[in-house]
Image (tube, grey):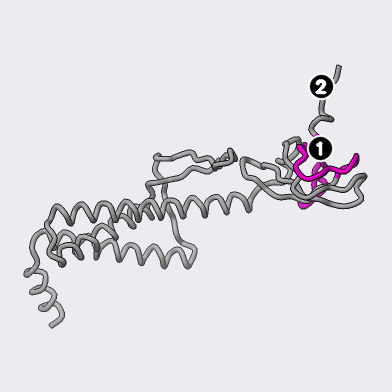
């Protein structure tokens, strides 16, 4: 009975409607399968070579690449492409209008998924940073650092391109907020020893 109903319903559709319905159904199933795989840790995504290097408005470079084309984003594109086309045709729009709306919808979905994957990648990279890579990097005091290791302050320092906030001490005079500093020693995973940048002058 169900098969008969589905066959009659399918035959009643125009060729264009069948195309959009076919795309929406196939890629919706793939979308659900990928979502389930993500939940159980079996998700695998292969990125294409289309990358965009991005910088923040303040000049802090983001070393990670924004990947527009990937398995996730392609599935998202065709899922939204198909369903938008189905809805557009059901609303009585022309095939050309349906194609236009579907393409725009798919591109928006692809861009959103690509950007979300970029953000997740950045978070993952930030969590795996080796603090020792901060050695000899320059940074800026965020919270004033007391003199002679009498207390801790905080600095913003870039590690492998990621801006991190770290606890810091200094052996010299106190360092006010906004001071430029350089990391001279990594005391532990949570604490840096810093000194003012102007103390690092070339030796005669």
Residue that mark 2 sits on: 202
Give how far across and how far down residue 83 sits, in percent: 24, 63
Residue lying at the far bottom in this picture: please name it.
1
Give how far across and how far down residue 27 sits, in percent: 28, 61
Q: Residues within 10 Å of mark 1 (few under 14, many from 20)?
A: some
In the depicted view, which residue is nearer to us: 61 or 34? 61
Give how far across and how far down residue 142 sits, in percent: 74, 48
Residue 96 falls left or right of residue 67? left
Residue drawn at (80%, 44%) of the image? 186
Q: Quadrant of the N terminus?
A: bottom left
Cα distance between the residues tagged 2 and 1? 15 Å
Residue 189 among magenta residues? yes
Residue 49 falls left or right of residue 83? right
Residue 110 among magenta residues? no
Decide which of tag 2 and tag 1 comes sooner along the chain: 1
Residue that mark 1 sits on: 184
Residue drawn at (59%, 49%) of the image? 125
Query: Bounds of the magenta span?
Result: 170-196
Q: Secondary structure at mark 1?
A: strand
Query: How many numbered tags mark residues here?
Result: 2
Residue 166 falls left or right of residue 125? right
In the depicted view, which residue is nearer to us: 174 or 35? 174
Q: Answer above or below: position of 59 versus 39.
A: above
Camera-nearest label, 2 or 1: 2
Give how far across and how far down residue 71 sits, in percent: 37, 52
Residue drawn at (39%, 43%) of the image? 48
Quadrant of residue 160 within the rendered picture: top right
Q: Are marks 2 and 1 in contact (CB under 8 Å)?
A: no
Q: Quadrant of the C terminus?
A: top right
């Amino acid at each position: 009975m169900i098969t008969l109903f589905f066959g009659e319903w399918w035959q009643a559709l125009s060729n264009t409607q069948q195309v959009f319905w076919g795309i929406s159904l196939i890629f919706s199933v793939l979308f659900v399968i990928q979502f389930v795989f993500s939940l159980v840790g079996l998700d695998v995504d292969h990125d294409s070579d289309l990358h965009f290097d991005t910088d923040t408005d303040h000049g802090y470079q983001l070393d990670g690449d924004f990947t527009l084309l990937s398995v996730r984003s392609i599935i998202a594109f065709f899922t939204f492409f198909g369903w938008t086309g189905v809805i557009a045709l059901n609303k009585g729009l022309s095939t050309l209008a349906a194609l236009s709306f579907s393409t725009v919808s798919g591109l928006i979905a692809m861009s959103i998924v690509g950007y979300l994957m970029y953000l997740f990648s950045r978070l993952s990279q930030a969590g795996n940073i080796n603090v020792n890579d901060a050695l000899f990097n320059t940074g800026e005091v965020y919270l004033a650092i007391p003199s002679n290791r009498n207390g801790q302050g905080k600095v913003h320092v870039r590690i492998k391109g990621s801006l991190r906030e770290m606890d810091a001490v200094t052996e010299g005079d106190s360092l006010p907020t906004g001071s430029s500093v350089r990391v001279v020693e990594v005391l532990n995973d949570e604490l840096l020893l810093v000194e003012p940048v102007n103390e690092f002058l070339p030796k005669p």
